[in-house]
Image (cartoon, rainbow, N blue to C red):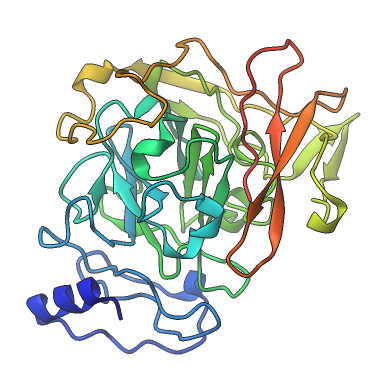
């Protein structure tokens, strides 16, 4: 157990609950206000849970190892990010911690100005937040094109290990989102939490398409410089599309075949309604100022306000690949996606 974890447990007088060994994280159910110290009690190949789920004012701050996250509204959500500066998210998926837009949850708080565009969407089956972020300010390496986090992972212990997500979007009470996914990288993010009462929570929050990024797993507007919350229709299940009137299921190729150079379809962006624009100056007022700017910055972090995310086109969009090392010595191809119009590359296809 990490020293800070032990210290918090000792200070709170909390004795970790003993949960069944080997139970998949997505099969564990927890109640807000009665969380165990750690949701993951296994000691498998990846070791023990890095942080903790019992978070409060004593754990809050820039060194918090809280691994309980929330998604409620445009001004109240968390993203997963590395605990250490200048990290590749794909290398620390299991150890990632919660970075929230406001204090009060015992987590780290995303610095002011880090999020440069966001859309919050509530649909019949899920809530979703998408947007742009200066990812260096939440410890993700500037040129890192991405990683995917979800409550599964190859060993079913989740990425992060023991990471939990709650929302008050379904009835006003904090409810555990058993199925969710969060893609981070390329200056872009998307987080979707599926209503556990829905019949297709696992389908809308599918976790197997980890190499094709936000635009296919969480299709949305992705406009930098815009801040809005909307109601929306459900998307198609990730990996499902309609071609010439026939419903088709996409199969993600194995990593051994190299980088994904093109896609056979463009994901349908669901219709939205009742959109409300927000002034960024009034959002996240409790967030701290950034303590450090990106190393390449000379003073102010700026972005093109009209930038939109590009998608892979089957008609031959250029794609360059890089390689991100994994802790176990394996590597994954990361695809940089370029628009056909020749706009600046938006490097995002998650690990």
Is residue 66 placed above or below 80 in the rendered structure? Answer: below
In the image, what residue occupies the spot 19% across and 31% down?
Answer: 289
The reply, left or right, for residue 82 in relation to residue 194 is: left
Nearest the viewer among 102 and 113 is 113
Query: Image quadrant for the N terminus?
Result: bottom left
Locate residue 153: give its quadrant: bottom right
- Spot occupied by residue 90 in the image (x, y as percentages of width and height): 56, 54
In the image, what residue occupies the spot 48% across and 73% down?
Answer: 25
In the image, what residue occupies the spot 50% across and 59% down?
Answer: 93
In the image, what residue occupies the spot 59% across and 23% down?
Answer: 309
* Number of numbered labels in the structure image: 0
Q: Is residue 315 visible?
A: yes
Is residue 274 placed above or below 293 in the rendered structure? Answer: above
The reply, left or right, for residue 18 in relation to residue 90 is: left
Nearest the viewer among 5 and 52 is 5
Locate residue 133: give its quadrant: top left
- Spot occupied by residue 71 in the image (x, y as percentages of width and height): 35, 45
- Spot occupied by residue 328 in the image (x, y as percentages of width and height): 62, 70
Is residue 39 placed above or below 102 in the rendered structure? Answer: below
Q: Is residue 229 visible?
A: no
The reply, left or right, for residue 252 in relation to residue 165 is: right
Nearest the viewer among 103 and 86 is 86
Locate residue 298: give its quadrant: top left
- Spot occupied by residue 223 in the image (x, y as percentages of width and height): 50, 18
Nearest the viewer among 256 and 106 is 256
């Amino acid at each position: 157990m990490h020293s800070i974890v032990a210290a918090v447990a000792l200070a709170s007088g909390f004795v970790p609950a003993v949960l069944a060994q080997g139970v998949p994280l997505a099969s564990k159910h927890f109640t807000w206000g009665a969380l165990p110290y750690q949701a993951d009690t296994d000691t498998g190949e990846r070791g023990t849970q890095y942080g903790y789920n019992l978070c409060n004012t004593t754990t809050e701050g820039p060194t918090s190892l809280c691994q309980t996250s929330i998604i409620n509204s445009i001004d109240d959500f968390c993203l997963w990010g590395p605990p250490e500066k200048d990290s590749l998210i794909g290398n620390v998926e299991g150890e990632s911690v919660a970075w929230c837009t406001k204090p009060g949850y015992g987590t780290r708080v995303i610095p002011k100005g880090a999020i440069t565009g966001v859309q919050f969407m509530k649909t019949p089956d899920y809530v979703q937040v998408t947007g742009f972020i200066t990812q260096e300010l939440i410890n993700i390496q500037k040129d890192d094109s991405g990683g995917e986090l979800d409550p599964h992972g190859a060993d079913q212990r989740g990425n992060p290990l023991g990471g939990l997500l709650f929302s008050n979007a379904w009835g006003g009470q904090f409810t555990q989102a058993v199925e969710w996914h969060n893609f981070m990288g390329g200056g872009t993010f998307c987080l979707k939490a599926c209503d556990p009462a829905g019949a297709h929570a696992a389908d809308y929050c599918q976790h197997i398409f980890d190499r094709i990024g936000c635009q296919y797993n969480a299709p949305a507007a992705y406009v930098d410089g815009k801040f809005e919350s909307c109601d929306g229709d459900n998307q198609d299940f990730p990996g499902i599309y309609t071609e010439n009137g026939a419903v088709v299921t996409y199969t993600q190729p194995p990593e051994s075949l190299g980088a994904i150079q093109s896609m056979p379809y463009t994901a349908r962006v669901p219709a939205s309604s009742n959109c409300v624009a927000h002034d960024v100056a009034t959002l996240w007022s409790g967030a701290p100022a950034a303590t450090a700017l990106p190393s390449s910055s000379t003073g102010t972090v700026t972005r093109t306000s009209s930038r939109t995310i590009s998608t892979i086109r089957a008609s031959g969009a250029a794609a360059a690949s890089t390689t991100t090392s994994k802790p176990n010595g394996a590597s994954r191809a990361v695809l940089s996606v370029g628009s056909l119009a020749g706009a600046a590359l938006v490097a995002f296809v998650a690990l």
